[in-house]
Amino acid sequence: MDIYLHIIIFFVLCLTFVVLEKILGPHLEKNEPPLLTHKVPLFGHFYGLVRYGPEYYTRVSAKSRPPIFTLGIFGTRSYVVNTSQIIHSIQRNAKTLSFAPLIPYVAERIAGLRPELCKAWFVDNGRFDEGMGVEHHRLIHHTLYTVEGARQMNDAVLTELKPLMDEIPSWGTNFGIYKWMVHVISQTSFGAVYGPNHPMNDVEVEKAFWAFENNAGSLLTSVWPKYQARTAWNGRKKLAAGFLKYYQDGNKGASTFVTMRRKLFEENGFKIEDIAQFEAGMSTPILSNTAPALFWLIREIYARPELLAEVREEISHAIIKGSRDGNPTFTMDVPSLKTKCPRFVAVYHEILRMHGIGTSARRVLQDTIVDNKYLVKKGTLILMPFAPVHAEQKWWGKNPASFDINRQLKTDGPKRPAVAFRSFGGAPHLCPGRQVATLEILCIGAMLISRFDVEPALGYWTTPKLTYTMSGIATPSSDIAVDMKPLPGTDGEWGYEMGNPKLKFSLASN
């Protein structure tokens, strides 16, 4: 009898969920993107998002791969885009499909900024083209995109990087290569942006940053983040305390960008505690993609001896040898990494393509037709995961899941559009630090390849599983223990020469 009762209850619940889903909707108009249903009514997509995070947008449509579809959760709707063609159409409608309205929400949830300050970021005038956020956007362009701004930032990166590369032997043997990369990237990036007294000088703050960064997504999905997202919450709290001390001490030696941003914030009613809170939450893009990108670059090259030899030979042509006081010197000419190292740069592009797991988002400000076909409704969210676009055979050839740098070197056939590569976002919202990050990754990688043999402790290179976080590049789920041994003939003084401050690496997103 109990069995029959359980069966009846089960079917009643299933029927209830089906009926509720029908009632709640979403109820689509005729030319909206088709609704992608779940075999578990009402709760199926919600559970998938909680379990898989942003990866779910790609996973849920992997079999049918519709160009664009509607994802319904508890009566709400979002549109998920799987093709570069539709993304191109979305980018052309930037006035009605905008990222700007989402920034205050992210600042409040991720950074923990006071709601009234978040609302001041953009004025809700229907276009979101007024407010402090507009001034902040101009500030980024003035300090990072001008020749002088680029020169200052690039020089600062290379100045911070040199001693960190020289201290590799002090790490001893059998240490985690990703742990080393995280430390180097943390010190280099924060030193270049925030100056010599940056918060990451405190090892506990550095640990707190990565605890926060690796779990920041939980702050978006939690109802009570202080308790449900405890790791991210506590990491952010310690990081904010580090920034507060930094700003109370006068942020000495900071970049022009940080100095001018503090002034902008203070002029718009931010207290010093608010600035520290903002920096704690919104400083993650400085580091979050750089460390995993460097990891995959080095792992893919060193795991292939033939490719390693080819890349090492290329980089050797970018090194100027000399002497000072009878001692050998080696200077890496940074512009030559662009002009003389095509296979090295191709590996970089390929690992970004393969491990790009981010999702771009836009809010629909008014009803819009995209791709001359699909209606997207005002107030809804458009999500554009990188992975499906990075697997389009039309642009990337057969077997897109495999590592193949030749697809990046290919010059024949139709020209690949910028929209087919999403690792730095897409117009008009490209990552403002993409050139600095690329410079940093390639300079660390080139110096490591030129000076050190990196041997995995196991005797072979493992392939860690991907971990999906809020960053645009998948992080490795486990570290790889390595030994780094200086190569013969590399004893001497090493350094970098930046050369032309207008240098820009060719990036598919440009």
Image (cartoon, rainbow, N blue to C red):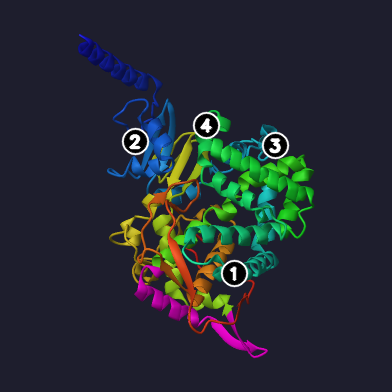
Relative vertical location of residue 396 with respect to residue 284 in this rendering, above or below? below
Relative vertical location of residue 135 with respect to residue 416 in this rendering, above or below? above
Q: Nearer the viewer, mark 3 or mark 4?
A: 4
Indicate which disc, 3 or 2, sits on the residue closer to the N terminus: 2
Kind of residue at badge 1: Glu
Residue at point 53%, 61% (across, down) = 180
Indicate which disc, 2 or 1, sits on the residue closer to the N terminus: 2
For residue 163: magenta? no
Residues packed near mark 1 inside 10 Å, few (<14), some (14 to 19) or many (20 plus)? few
Query: On residue 117, which mark appears?
Result: 3
For label 4, the SS is: helix
Q: Residue 262: percent from the left, percent from the top?
A: 75, 49
Relative vertical location of residue 218 with respect to residue 14 in this rendering, above or below? below
Q: CA distance from mark 1 to mark 4?
A: 40 Å
Q: Nearer the viewer, mark 3 or mark 2?
A: 3
Indicate which disc, 4 or 2, sits on the residue closer to the N terminus: 2
The residue under label 1 is 167
Kind of residue at badge 3: Leu
For residue 304: magenta? yes
The residue under label 2 is 34
Kind of residue at badge 4: Gln
Residue nearest the observer in this picture, 380 or 251: 251
Residues packed near mark 3 inside 10 Å, few (<14), some (14 to 19) or many (20 plus)? some
**Region rendered in magenta:** 302-331
Q: Residue 434: percent from the left, percent from the top?
A: 55, 60
